[in-house]
Each structure stands twice: as C-alpha cells, then as structure tokens.
Amino acid sequence: MSWKWLFAVGVAWGCTCSAPLPPCELFGRSRAVFSGVVLDTNEDGRGGLSRSTFYLVRVEEGFRGLAPEQKEVFIDPGSFTSCYTYFEVGKKYLFYGWGLGGIASISFTGRRGEEVALPPQWQEKKDLKVYSVPMCSGSKEWENAQEDVDWIRRRLREETSTRVYGQTVQSAKVHWDGVAVVPLAGAKVFLRNGDAVQTVVSGADGRFAFEGIAPGKYGLHAELAPWEGSYRADLTVAERGCAERMLPLVSHGEVRGVVRNRAGRPIAGVDVELMRVLARGDLARRATITESTDRDGAFRMRNVPAGEFVVGVNAESALHLESRWPTTFYPGVGALRRARVLRLAPNGIVEGISFALPNPLLTRTVTVRVLWADGSEVGRGANVSAERIEPLLGAYRSGHVNDQSEVRLQVTQGVAYKMQASTYGRGLRTIGADPVTLPAGSEPVTLEIRLRENRPSQ
C-alpha cells in the first residue's frame, strides 16, 4: 500500500492511492493496528492544509504496535497533504496507523513548522502518541471491517500461512473492484527469491496462489504467448502475512470505427465503450476500454484484450448530462440482444465499425434553495443531489450551494427525481433533510429544501 504525499509550495495535487490491499498485507506494513472510537477532534471544516489536525481516539482493542497502557491515542488524518480524510466523532473504526508514533506536543504544528497550541481540553493529553491515518491507510468503519478483524484474530492465534496470490488479467484498464478486467487463464506465474524460482499456472478465472512460502522479498510476474508478459511486482511478505497482486498481460488488439448522428454527420466527443460479454450472455458492469471520438467522429481503441465484446455508447454509465444519448450498441440498436458481438483473437483487429446515435434527450434546470429548519439561509457549502427515482438510465447529479444558498442542476426532461440536501454540523456530523420529489416535466423549476435542524450554535 502506498500513497503520495503531494504538497509543495502551497499547491496540492490529487491524492493517488494504490489498489486496496487485503488485511493480511496491511497488518504487516502498519506501525499500529487497533480498534477505537473517535472521541473529539480539532477539525473545523476547513481541511488540514494549514495546521495539524488530530482526532482523539479511545482504544478498544490493540492488535499490533500499541502498549497495553495506551488507552487513548491521537490519529492524524493526513495533515498538509491531499490525502487528508475525515472521521466521525462517536463512531468506531479499525485503524491501520502509520508513521513513527510521535507524541502530540511535538507533532502538533502549523504549515510552516511553527508550534501550534493544543486545544485547552487536550493539554493534559499532550504526551499521547500520534499515528498517521490518511485516506489511503486502509482504515475503515468498524461495521465494514469484519473480514479484516477475522483475519487479524486468526493471525494472532498463528492460524494463518504465508502466501502470495492474485489474478492474471488482460485488461488495458484495471479497476480496484476488478469488474472491468478480463481474466486470463493458463498464464505461467513466476515467484522469485534470489535464484530460487517457483511457478504455478493461473486457473480458469486467472487466479493463482503460492501457499506456505517463507517470509521475505520476492519478484512476481506472469507470461503467456502471444500476450506481452506482465510487469515485475517487487514485494515483501511478512511472516504469516501475504501479498496480493493483479498481473496484467497485454494483447495489442485494436477496435476502430466512426459514430454519426441520424443525418449521417460525425459526432465528436462521444465516449465509446467496449463492454465484455460474460459467459451467461450479459455484460460486465464496467467498460474494459473507453475512447472518445475525434472531430471526425472516429475512435480507435488500442491494447484490446482477446475475447467477446460489444461496442456501445452509455452502456456502462447509462445516460448522463454530458452524454445525453440513450444506450445504443453497434450496429445502432438499443437492445443488447440485437447488438453485434465482436470476437477478438490475441492481437486481433476489428475495423470498419459505423453506427448512428438517436437524438439526444433534452434537459431542464432545477434551482434548489437550501434553508435551515427555521427558514434562514444555509449559505455556501451545503450539498444537493438529484437521483432518478426509476434508475433505468441512472442519471445522478449533485452540487454545492453558493453564498445565496442556491444551486442549479441540469436534469433530464420527462424524468422524476428524488432531491436531497445535507450539510455538516459540529464535529462533522451530517445534518440532512427529508427528500423532496421533483415530478417529471420539461419546464425550469425552483424547489426549497429545509434541513431538519437549525444552524448549530458556535
């Protein structure tokens, strides 16, 4: 697991996390692993780029790295970085803590390194240790952590084995949830430790595993001609821990074509999706490759995997406001059963695809005013969302209100939406509102949504 601490000279870049790691790998990498309830925070809603932000946590169970007497600790959610995250006061979490575990009186600083006074209620806690728990640490809410906790308890009882496992795939785009990948069976997987090499062959779903290996440093890669071999993953496996990796092998296939409107004119800027056809005949939930058409309406997909696919527009994400065409598959049909299936061999090429899109659907403007329960204006920062009540075409819109407590959203005409609003109260507690139904229609409309509570006192 890694994250990029990206902050320099007042400029922050987006946080980049690697794919989520299993608990058997996170446990060995973490400085401290423990469960606990968040008791307090100095987070004031402005984020953590100007000073250290801490959360005070009551430790309920220490799994690794904490002394028995450590009943309370501070966690730092990624101060001064774009990997800054938030926790909810009163909620229980499983924490994977990083860093050196320094004490609060040393760690609590401003952006330029100057000392910042601890809040008065924390003065007596100035010697508590601090662990870094940024966005990509692997920490999670307790109700979502039971798989992690089950493995950790087995590890502490010495019931786990040291292993390396994963999946060989042939996808140009690898998603964390794995739904867009194309598994590759029969790949030979190599695990190297110095001059010692172990091999296994991936199964029908591309899965492989090396069980009961010695802890240590390894190199891992896969090969299967005529696919281009995978990259080499360098990894360290802790005793009774693991490493999980996805190894992509590349097929240099191509799919080329043109998208037009009903009048035969090319359409630029259309996202064309390559969707994998599963064994049971339906589609994978995510596109394997997405490419936009150029000014001539042409698209060219490179490094296309071998297998069976259909090409479509709004097949994955369905209709949205930047792409208002109904779901359409090549050769220009709306029903999947009538779509033409493309069968690609390794490094195969399909060209000459041409299909027309129907007219785009129309939109309407909905202006939403967000007020506190007493009718006073919320001001900037509240969030408003519009979710289609019948999500067949799945448009979901959201935005933040301006200083006048308003936000304007574009939604599809002829569709009813559930409108919701929320904002943060003290301690990052969410204050919501009862949903308001926006009936189907075509005219611009203004709605008022009142939150369930009044403005919190300062």
Image (cartoon, rainbow, N blue to C red):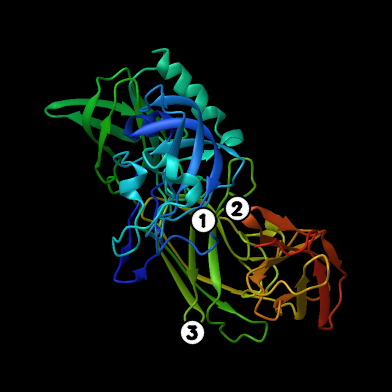
The residue singled out by tag 2 in the image is 427
Q: Residue at x 35, y 71 (%)?
A: 11
Callouts 2 and 3 close, C-beta under 8 Å = no
The residue singled out by tag 1 in the image is 43
- The residues tagged by marks 2 and 3 sit, at their Cα atoms, a distance apart of 52 Å
Of pointers 2 and 3, the one earlier in the residue sequence:
3
Q: Is residue 261 visible?
A: yes
Of pointers 3 and 1, the one earlier in the residue sequence:
1
- The residues tagged by marks 1 and 2 sit, at their Cα atoms, a distance apart of 7 Å
Callouts 1 and 2 close, C-beta under 8 Å = yes
Residue 157 lies in what quarter of the image?
Answer: top left
Local SS, label 2: helix
- Is 377 placed above or below 212 here? below
Of 53 and 290, which appears nearest the observer? 53
Q: In the image, 196: left or right of 248?
A: left
Image quarter of the N terminus: top left
Q: Residue at x 26, y 46 (%)?
A: 231
Residue 317 lies in what quarter of the image?
Answer: bottom right
Of pointers 1 and 2, the one earlier in the residue sequence:
1
Q: Which mark is residue 296?
A: 3
Q: Position of residue 255 (x, y in %)?
A: 45, 64
- The residues tagged by marks 3 and 1 sit, at their Cα atoms, a distance apart of 51 Å
